[in-house]
Image (tube, helix red, strand yellow):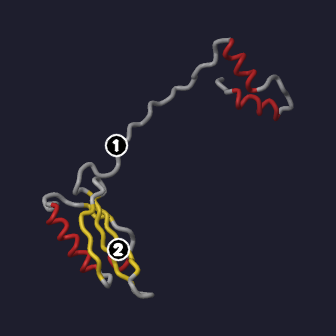
């Protein structure tokens, strides 16, 4: 059977036998012309590239808190980015967070970029107020 020296040496050691070190096994196999690949290696699987293939296919958007001028005051940055080109497609700053403002921004960005002919995938995190 095809057992590698890295497996032979510990197996023999468990039986209380020592014939040679792992490097000596490799040296003997190489001298005898038996140190070569014995398994039927599979070709690497060619995977389809993941992610968008062209602009206006997948956009990601998020709402981020930005500190205001006073302690405890925040503004909300609504940001839309095209994942393929990494271009900022739209952004707005508001004093409150709401799904209606996000919907308007996305609609405006889609019209501005001409992304109305084919379906656009919009990706967002699990922010509950904007779901």
Image quadrant where one finds the C terminus? bottom left
Quadrant hosting residue 76 = bottom left
Specify few, some or many for label 1: CA neighbours under 10 Å numbering under 14, 14-19, or 20 or more.
few
Q: Which residue is mark 1?
A: 48
Q: Nearer the viewer, mark 1 or mark 2?
A: 2
| Residue furthest out toward the top | 32
Q: Is residue 131 left or right of residue 55?
A: right
| Residue furthest out toward the front | 69
Label 1 residue SS: loop
- Please report the residue visible at 77 percent of the width from the left and 32 percent of the height from the top: 11
Label 2 residue SS: strand
- Please report the residue visible at 38 percent of the width from the left and 83 percent of the height from the top: 68
Q: Which mark is residue 63?
A: 2
Q: Earlier in the sequence, mark 1 or mark 2?
A: 1
When the figure is inspected, residue 46 is found, relative to residue 53, above or below; the finding is above
**Nearest to the observer: residue 73 or residue 18:** 73
Image spot of residue 90 (x, y percent): 24, 67
**Nearest to the observer: residue 79 or residue 115:** 79
In space, the residues marked 1 and 2 are separated at their CA atoms by 31 Å
Image spot of residue 115 (x, y percent): 17, 60
Image quadrant where one finds the N terminus? top right
Quadrant hosting residue 3 = top right
């Amino acid at each position: 059977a095809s057992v590698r020296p890295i497996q032979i040496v510990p197996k023999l050691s468990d039986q209380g036998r020592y014939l040679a070190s792992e490097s000596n096994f490799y040296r003997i196999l190489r001298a005898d012309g038996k140190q070569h690949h014995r398994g039927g290696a599979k070709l690497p699987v060619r995977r389809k590239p993941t992610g968008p293939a062209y602009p206006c296919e997948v956009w990601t958007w998020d709402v981020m808190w930005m500190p205001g001028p006073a302690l405890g005051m925040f503004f909300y940055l609504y940001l839309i980015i095209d994942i393929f080109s990494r271009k900022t497609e739209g952004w707005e700053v508001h004093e409150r967070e709401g799904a209606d403002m996000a919907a308007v921004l996305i609609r405006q960005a889609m019209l501005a970029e001409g992304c109305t002919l084919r379906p656009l995938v919009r990706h967002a995190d699990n922010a509950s107020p904007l779901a």
